[in-house]
Amino acid sequence: MTDLAALPASVSAVLRDEPVPDWRAPTLATLTEKRFSDRDWIFERKFDGMRCLAFRDGDRVRLLSRNRQPLNGTYPELVDALGAQHTTRFVVDGEVVAFEGRRTSFARLQGRLGITDPEVARASPVRVFYYLFDLMHLDGKSTTDVPLLWRKRLLRKAIDFDDPLRCTPHRVGDGITAYRQACERGDEGVIAKLADSTYDGRRSPNWLKFKCVRDQEFVVGGYTAPKGSRIELGALLLGYHDGRDLVYAGKVGTGFDEATLRRLHGRLSPIEQDAAPFTRGLVRENGARWVRPELVVQIGFSEWTRDGKLRHPRYLGLRTDKEPADVVRETR
């Protein structure tokens, strides 16, 4: 039973008939510096993983990243688990994660990214889990206008949660405690969601990010030559979009091992260009090699300096699931 018939009349009235869609744009959380408790909001763990939307229509299962990249070959065990469900038509939203101890680790998940052969993925030592937190379609009905807590109830009925599928737990009301405990555990932070919100399919003020650590995506605009025993490259030159400008945000030269340096150099060499792509911000790097701003990376840092550069940046990983045009400065 998917329990659609058990919905109260006020909720079932907003269901819409539709076939299983080919795509549904994900709702994205807005970063905030505020921390609050409110019984009209729920609070979920913020995972250090990769956003993934799953579409099942009969025997067909499709996994797509937030920028519509196919992921079936990368996570075949998730395809198998979703294909074995008693519910045969649904669209769900969640995060794919890998663990380093008790913490989710995007760095460890890197061992799966880029794999497109299901057999290679199955042989990987990196075990993944899919934490589901939303439901946007069920049995021929769009549920995007159903209030969030009702969508979660339907999700728990529609999916049998056995590894590698897990249901994302949430706390009602007490956001301050949820945030404090997340930071004490070493988690990324907390996602706050308005309990009666619809699924907006865009960046929404009804979903908010409380981050314990500072990190965000940046676009790579160039790199420096290696020095000493370093191989392939010295540092990545980073930027973000502000309107039509690509703004220089500084360089990162830590967080790499040799395999990462080789992989990055292999991605950057084919997209080299003569001119710097940055249109704002002074770059003081003699002999820098410029690239087309097509590669997105995740960077951790301690703070922004007064002149708009990153302090103590460290490389965390490639973000193949993010479009360069979507990369903006998240905090001031």
Image (tube, grey):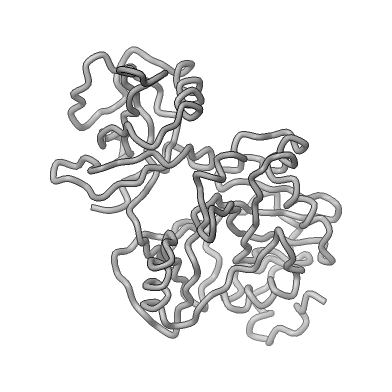
Determine the residue positioned at 75% across, 77% down.
Answer: 4
How far from the left and from the top, in percent, is residue 36?
A: 34, 77
42 vs 189: above or below: below
13 vs 23: above or below: below
Determine the residue positioned at 77% across, 79% down.
Answer: 3
In screen coordinates, is 184 left or right of 162?
left
How many numbered discs? 0
Determine the residue positioned at 29% across, 69% down.
Answer: 34
How far from the left and from the top, in percent, is residue 182?
A: 42, 68
How far from the left and from the top, in percent, is residue 307?
A: 14, 41
242 vs 13: above or below: above
253 vs 21: above or below: above
How far from the left and from the top, in percent, is residue 97?
A: 58, 53
Residue in front for this viewpoint, 115 or 61? 115
Residue in front for this viewpoint, 69 or 226? 226
In screen coordinates, is 7 left or right of 186?
right
Determine the residue positioned at 61% across, 52% down.
Answer: 52
Image quarter where the N terminus lies is bottom right
Residue in front for this viewpoint, 109 or 281? 109
> Outermost residue, left direction?
306
